[in-house]
Structures are given as C-alpha cells and as structure tokens.
Amino acid sequence: MLDQATKLRQMAEQYVIKDDRRDTETKVLTITSGKGGVGKSNIVVNLGIMLQKLGKKVMIFDADLGMGNDDVLIGCVPKYNVFDVIFSDKEIEEVLVEGPYGIKLLPGGSGLSKVDDLTEVQRKKFLKKLENIEGFDYILIDTGAGVNRSVLGFIACSDELVVVVTPEPTALTDAYSLLKAVNHFKIKANAKVIINRVISVSEGNNTFSKLRNAADKFLKIKLEHLGNIADDSKVTQAVRKQKPLVLSYPNTEFVEDITIIAKHLQGINYRVTTSGVQELFKRIFNIFS
C-alpha cells in the first residue's frame, strides 16, 4: 500500500495545473461514490447522453472492475472489453460501443486487473491503436464504489473528481470516508458533489452542507455542490426498459436536474491536463503497474 500511496502522490504532483488551458482538450471526470446503490452509473449514463445532446463529444469508460453495468443501462451488449485490444488483438473500433446520440462506451471489465502483466511492447501497441478514437470533449470514468486501490487510482488519473451521494446517513458517512482517503493520499484538493434522490431542493442543499462542513473542519479538500437530482420513480422503469431516462422520460424532474448539471459542467473553467484517450491510458498504466 505504501508503493501505491507514493504513486498516487506522484500522479497528483506530476499533473500540476498549468495556466495555458485550452477548451479543445479532453476533460476527464472520475465519477464515483462512497457506497453502492446511490445511482452513480445511472447519473453517468444520463449525464453523458445529455452532454452529447448539447453538442459535446463524450466517451464513458466503464471502469468498474467487478460490477460494470453501463452497457445494460444504455441497452447494448458489448462483445469485448478494452483489454481485448491487447490480449485478443481486437481493433479499438470493435470494442467501442456507440450509444444514443453518438455517445461512445468503452467497457473496461476485469481486464483492468491484468495491467501489471502487460509488456512494454503490448502497451505501445495498445496506445497506438487508441489514436483512432481521439477528439472527445469529455471522458466520464464510472468507477466501482468504495475506497480501494482502483478507485483512488482512477481519481488520480482524472482532471476532476465528482462524488455522488444520497441524503441517507450511511451514504454520507461512506462519501466522507472516500474524501478522507483522497485527502490523506493528497490526490485531489477539490471535489464536486452531486446529491441524488432528494425529495426537495432544501434536502439536497442541507445534505451537501453536512458533507462540506465535515470536510471544512477535518479535511484539506474544498467541495463544490454540482447540483441535486430529484428522487423519481421513473428511474426504475427506465432501467427495466434498458433505455436511459433522458430518452424514455424526457419531461421528468430527473432529466431537468441532469440538464442543469450538464450545462453547469460546460461552464466550468476546467483545470485540464489531458490531451485525449491515449494520455489517459498512459496514466492508467503508470498508476496501476
């Protein structure tokens, strides 16, 4: 774990933010949560599609090693995952899945656990194949939940951290534990927070205030409230239909909230350090090896 901690700190220091930022660079957001069941993947999929609808080019990287289900939420069945490009000599176009409005999904799968076994030749060949999928405005990394090596690694690889939490006390406690680990390893000094399944705006705002107050008091990490998302019964129906809510029930309060967050993301002055998918996977190879 000490080696991992050193690598995480090195990652945070290596990608120091520069002032010569360009809007054309790819913004990499790791979207995660302290616990499972808070609706994180649903948010990732619907937010990605909404950004695509707003004219941005988006790729979702399903980086949940054990329970990735973004493909199910979108309603597609990928034949391969990203590491079939390496181990089965597939082309990246065979792995990349196209979803609604042209959004791309890159399934990660359990192949991520094999990064340690890659030779330098395999890595270079893989990175070369990634040249064909450049030009994204956003890459949304959907990680597994909780505090572990892979989640912290993906946070270190990204430009921005977004934490999804609900008003439930257990979700708040677990979100704080995640932020505590991020702070302890000095991975990020800032994080954005989405409060999901709120029954009112005031409940969402109060939930964020509780989390921010704890962070301000005990951690050296600044939190920003990215927005609230209403508790909506249509979410379950959309999942059963395998058709994202922004498509199946576009006039719901959930979709209104997702739209506000998507527009907010577009207005943020990002501290971008990523030039594309190749750069992202160089970081992944660096931190997971």
Image (cartoon, rainbow, N blue to C red):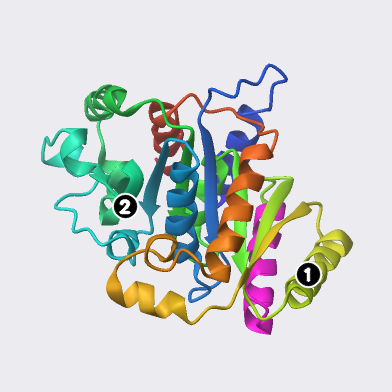
Q: Position of residue 101 (x, y in %)?
A: 34, 45
| View extreme (front): residue | 251
Type of amino acid under label 2:
Ser
Q: Is residue 177 above or below residue 114?
A: below
Toward the viewer: 9 or 102? 102
- At horizontal 46% and vertical 34% (from top left) the residue drawn is 283
| Residue designated by label 1 | 205
Q: Which residues are magenta?
A: 166-184
| View extreme (right): residue | 217
Q: Is residue 103 visible?
A: no
Q: Quadrant of residue 240?
A: bottom left
Toward the viewer: 127 or 77? 77
Toward the viewer: 132 or 119? 132
Q: Position of residue 248 (x, y in %)?
A: 37, 66
Q: Is residue 107 magenta?
A: no
Q: Which mark is residue 113?
A: 2
Please state if 286 lies on the left or on the right of 187 as rendered: left
Q: Quadrant of residue 91?
A: top left
Q: Is residue 203 visible?
A: yes
Disc 2 secondary structure class: helix
Marks 1 and 2, the one that precedes in the sequence: 2
- At horizontal 67% and vertical 81% (from top left) the residue drawn is 199
CA separation in Å, label 1 and label 2: 38 Å
Disc 2: CA contacts within 10 A as few (<14), some (14-19) or many (>=20): some
Q: Quadrant of residue 164?
A: bottom right
Disc 1: CA contacts within 10 A as few (<14), some (14-19) or many (>=20): some
Disc 1 secondary structure class: helix
* Count of numbered labels shown in the rendering: 2
- At horizontal 52% and vertical 70% (from top left) the residue drawn is 252
